[in-house]
Image: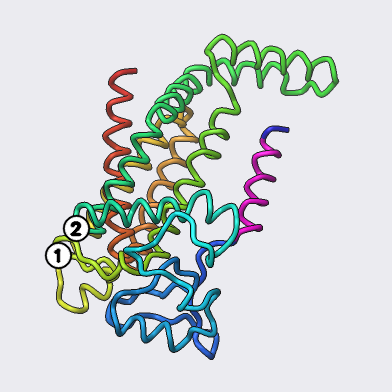
């Protein structure tokens, strides 16, 4: 019942408010910034500062969700704007995070650094929840032999009395190891909105993509960067692959126990790493840098939790 409530709430939240939308041209094709390879966002929260980019938005303003004249400059954006996108999703999650990115970016003089620091801050705030989840997953591995014994015991019994006894024994096992089956659902309910809202906040603030961090122009995708001769993007791709693989590996290892599960986990790890690796060529550098630092943090966190456990 609780799972259904979580799912229904998530659906209502998203359908009432909407997500990031691509800017479309008159032929209903996505508008791409040719110099960076980035798909432009239609429902931006503030004005681009780059003149050529602003001209691109003016060209397709009729396809946007709001008039450009109603948007503030990114450096002047407030948590609440009278003439802005309405909705619970934007008001509670996206706009406050976008505002934090801009304020911290102004403080440090770099939006790339701001994106990475806020990404890490979110991970730090979620550490107590992550630690509890990791402990529950370790306990789930410990009870697997006993769970299999219960499954075998009631394998061919479908009567109501047997099903009730099976449920009681399973519940007793959960209580013995202090496991709450709903905790993982609760963690996802807390983490996923923050994760998606943060990515949306990045996508909907054009000023971020006009900035640079080290050798990376934050709006440029690795594919375009490599075509332009910036081979530092190879380092970015390698780091994405490395920390994605390590993050998935530690996460999945805590959930696997039987040989069959280990085999499935291995194939899933390879598939997800390859998928993310291919997709990363089309990610703007700002999001790619966020992905690297947060996954690196996640790997360090899981190593420390395993040692402590």
Whether 42 is drawn above or below 74: the answer is below
Image x and y of residue 28, in percent: 55, 85
Is 300 or 44 nearer to us in this picture?
44
Is 70 or 259 nearer to us in this picture?
70
Identify the disc placed on residue 109. Answer: 2
Question: Residue at point 32% right, 40% down?
Answer: 121
Identify the disc placed on residue 14. Answer: none
Q: Earlier in the sequence, mark 1 or mark 2?
A: 2
Q: Is residue 258 magenta?
A: no
Q: Residues within 10 Å of mark 2 (few under 14, many from 20)?
A: few
Residue that mark 1 sits on: 215
Magenta part of the chain? 3-17
Question: Residue at point 57% right, 35% down?
Answer: 185
The main secondary structure of the magenta stretch is helix
Nearest to the eye among marks 1 and 2: give it: 2
Q: Is residue 96 left or right of residue 287?
A: right
Q: Residues within 10 Å of mark 1 (few under 14, many from 20)?
A: few
- Camera sees residue 49: yes
Question: Residue at point 49% right, 86% down?
Answer: 25
């Amino acid at each position: 019942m609780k799972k259904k409530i979580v799912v229904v709430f998530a659906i209502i939240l998203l359908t009432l408010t909407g997500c990031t939308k691509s800017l479309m041209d008159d032929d209903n094709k996505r508008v791409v910034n040719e110099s960076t390879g980035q798909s432009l966002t239609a429902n931006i929260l503030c004005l681009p500062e780059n003149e050529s980019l602003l001209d691109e938005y003016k060209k397709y303003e009729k396809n946007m969700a709001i008039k450009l004249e109603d948007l503030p400059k990114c450096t002047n954006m407030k948590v609440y704007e009278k003439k802005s996108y309405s909705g619970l999703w934007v008001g509670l999650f996206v706009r406050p995070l976008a505002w934090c990115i801009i304020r911290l970016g102004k403080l440090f003089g770099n939006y790339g650094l701001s994106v990475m620091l806020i990404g890490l801050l979110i991970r730090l705030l979620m550490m107590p929840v992550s630690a509890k989840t990791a402990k529950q997953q370790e306990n789930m591995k410990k009870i697997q032999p006993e769970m299999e014994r219960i499954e075998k015991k009631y394998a061919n019994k479908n009567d109501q009395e047997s099903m009730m006894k099976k449920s009681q024994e399973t519940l007793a096992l959960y209580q013995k190891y202090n496991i709450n089956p709903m905790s993982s659902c609760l963690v996802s309910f807390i983490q996923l909105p923050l994760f998606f809202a943060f990515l949306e906040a990045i996508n909907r603030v054009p000023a971020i993509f006009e900035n640079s961090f080290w050798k990376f122009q934050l709006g440029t995708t690795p594919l375009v960067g490599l075509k332009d001769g910036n081979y530092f993007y190879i380092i970015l791709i390698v780091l994405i692959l490395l920390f994605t693989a390590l993050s998935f590996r530690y996460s999945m290892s805590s959930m696997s126990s039987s040989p069959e599960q280990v085999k499935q986990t291995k194939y899933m790890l390879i598939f997800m790493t390859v998928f993310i690796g291919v997709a990363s060529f089309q990610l703007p550098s700002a999001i790619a840098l966020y992905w690297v630092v947060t996954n690196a943090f996640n790997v360090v966190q899981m190593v420390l939790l395993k040692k402590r456990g």
